[in-house]
Image (cartoon, rainbow, N blue to C red):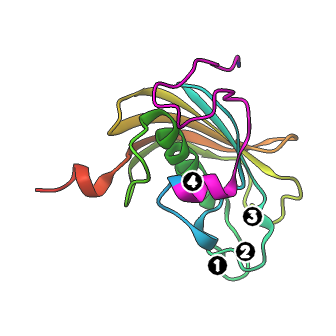
Amino acid sequence: MPVDRAIPVDGAIPVDRAMPLDRSWIELNIPHHGRMCLLDEVVEWNSQHIRCRAASHRLPDHPLRSQGRLGVASGIEYAAQTMAAHGALTGGAGRPEAGLLAGLRDVRLHVLRLDDIESDLICDATLVAGDRSTALYEFVLWTEAKRLMSGRATVVFDANQQLKP
């Protein structure tokens, strides 16, 4: 996919959108931090798409492990964090207090576990529709060898602000 190289209006986002953004940038710009920040790098992005890389699925103390295993459904959290990073990059509103995964559709699981995957995980998310507050994304979690899971998700980017009475 070609990378959009337009100069951002506020100057806060790197001009070269193919330039990787590291874990420290991710932790500063999505609601999750510490061990719950599962992503290691934003590999590339543009206004419609983002690709992130993660190696945390191999950690023995992964926060989503249950009974010593990391089920593939945990990949939904990797996708949600990828979408949150995209929202931070394209929305420019700063780190939200909380995001909300409002719905999932057409989720397909192609493996049973993530913790036995030796290579890094790659998560692609493509914006289907939305604005600065809510969005519909298609996502795919994969390795260089195979697709692990895919689906569609509806997200609310700054849930604390959006859901106030």
Q: Earlier in the sequence, mark 2 or mark 4?
A: 2
Horizontal side of 30 relative to 67 (left or right) equals: left
The segment highlighted magenta reads: 2-28
Write down the quadrant of residue 146 in the picture: top right
Distance between the Cα atoms at labels 3 and 1?
Answer: 12 Å
Q: Residues within 10 Å of mark 4 (few under 14, many from 20)?
A: many
The residue that disc 1 covers is 66
138 or 106: nearer the viewer: 138
Instruction: Check if mark 3's residue and mark 2's residue have beta carbons within 8 Å.
Output: no
The residue that disc 2 covers is 69
Q: Earlier in the sequence, mark 3 or mark 2?
A: 3
Q: Earlier in the sequence, mark 3 or mark 1?
A: 3
- Dominant secondary structure of the residues highlighted in magenta in the image: loop
Asked if residue 25 can be seen in this view, the reply is yes
Q: Which amino acid type is shown beneath numbered disc 4? A: Ile
Name which residue lies at 66% across and 29% down.
Answer: 17
Distance between the Cα atoms at labels 1 and 2?
Answer: 5 Å
The residue that disc 3 covers is 57
Q: Residue furthest bottom?
A: 67
- In the rendered view, tell whether residue 101 sits above or below residue 49: below
Q: Secondary structure at mark 2?
A: loop
- In the rendered view, tell whether residue 65 sits above or below residue 73: below
Q: Secondary structure at mark 4?
A: helix
Numbered circle sitting on residue 1: none
